[in-house]
Amino acid sequence: MKALCWTGVNETAVETVEDPKILNDHDVILKVRLSTTCGSDLHLLGGYIPTMRSGDVLGHEFMGEVVETGSAVTKHKVGDRVVVCSFIACGQCWYCTHGQFSLCDNGNPNPGLTEAMWGSSIGGCFAYSHALGGFAGSHAEYVRVPYADQGAFTVPDGVSDTAALFASDAAPTGWTGADLAGIAPGDTVAVWGAGGVGQMAARAAMLLGAEQVIVIDRLPERLRQVREHIGAETLDYTSDAVLPELKERTGGRGPDVCIEAVGMEAHGTGPLYLYDQAKQQLRLQTDRPTALREAIYACRKGGSLFSLGVFGGLVDKFPFGAIMNKGMTVRGAQQHGHRYIPMILDHIAAGEISTEHLATHVMPLSQGPRGYEMFKNKDDGCVRAVFTPGV
């Protein structure tokens, strides 16, 4: 079959690879109908996640049609239209039974790598390097889905393929951040990043009862999407100073909840951003915490901060004194999609969450390298490049 593969730092190619096979009784084989780029893919492309191998199939956000099932699969049959959570979880271990699916003890067959980096292993993830399992990704004609009864969810009638696609990762990741940040009715929430995850975090915050939601970015087409499809306020950090503006909009107090949805390659302005960028390029730090640092300073005293963008290793100039002295609550997580995807599909079906607008550029898989180039460089207002492997 044809698949879009990582072939080196900032290099991808469409190659012929082996068709996936059932390896475990709980697997299904999916014919991929749609698969999309994600901002966290850029960390792989840029070489910031060092456990990629040439030929690895990319893609972790996808939906499709079941074409083969393992003998132990009970919830799905051939022909079912399903969306698949990007994280792989068994559904049976202590973490899964406590709703922390991305921390699954059994989803990652290569636990030693993340144990060495972070002290503990987390779950597996499609196409997110060999540190998270080495699973083949979804930018392909077919993909094997482990633990399919746990991680694949039937798409309701009336929900389009494109709408369902973003219930795989962007929407549940955003909901994870908004929910675990502890948003209460009446809160003011600030979200850094107006990509797919940031937009979905903002919408989740609104549905959870936030009275005011402000999304911060620099790209006009993304800020426009926030206003038109999410219904939140926007702040362009290239034209307004973020900290004074947030204080102004919150009566001098600052947001109750801050959600950082950018991650290790955040952009910014001023000398500190240039410092972060230089240190990262020289590999003197692995992650660039520009947006996270700003969110810490912006959050009100006693407020809550959620780190939702992907970080992989070490950051410099981290203002822990501000966290401690301001009495902040800080959390972070990869997405617990198994916990949220059924509810999100219901919200999409009811018209309460809009996702289709994120698919700004739809193209065949053969144009995958160009799609990633557009996505990385934000060419032509690209928010997400979506691939149609069957075309």
Image (cartoon, helix red, strand yellow):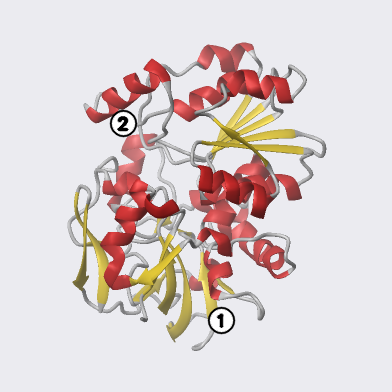
Residue type at tag 1:
Thr
Which of pointers 2 and 1 indicates the residue nearer the eye?
A: 2
| Residue under pointer 2 | 286
Task: Give the mark nearest the N terminus, 2 or 1.
Answer: 1
In-image side of 155 versus 28 (left or right): right
Q: Which residue is mark 1?
A: 74
Classify residue 209 as left or right of residue 126. Answer: right
Q: Is residue 79 above or below residue 250?
A: below
CA distance separating discs 2 and 1? 43 Å
| Residue 327 in the image: above or below residue 364 | above
Q: Secondary structure at mark 1?
A: loop
Number of marks in picture: 2
Q: Residue at x 21, y 26 (%)?
A: 282
Is 226 in front, or is 20? 226
Q: Which mark is residue 100?
A: none
Residue depicted at 51% across the width and 88% down the height: 79
Let me know if residue 182 appears in the view. no
User: Which is more toward the observer, 359 or 282?
Assistant: 359
| Residue 163 visible in the shown view | yes
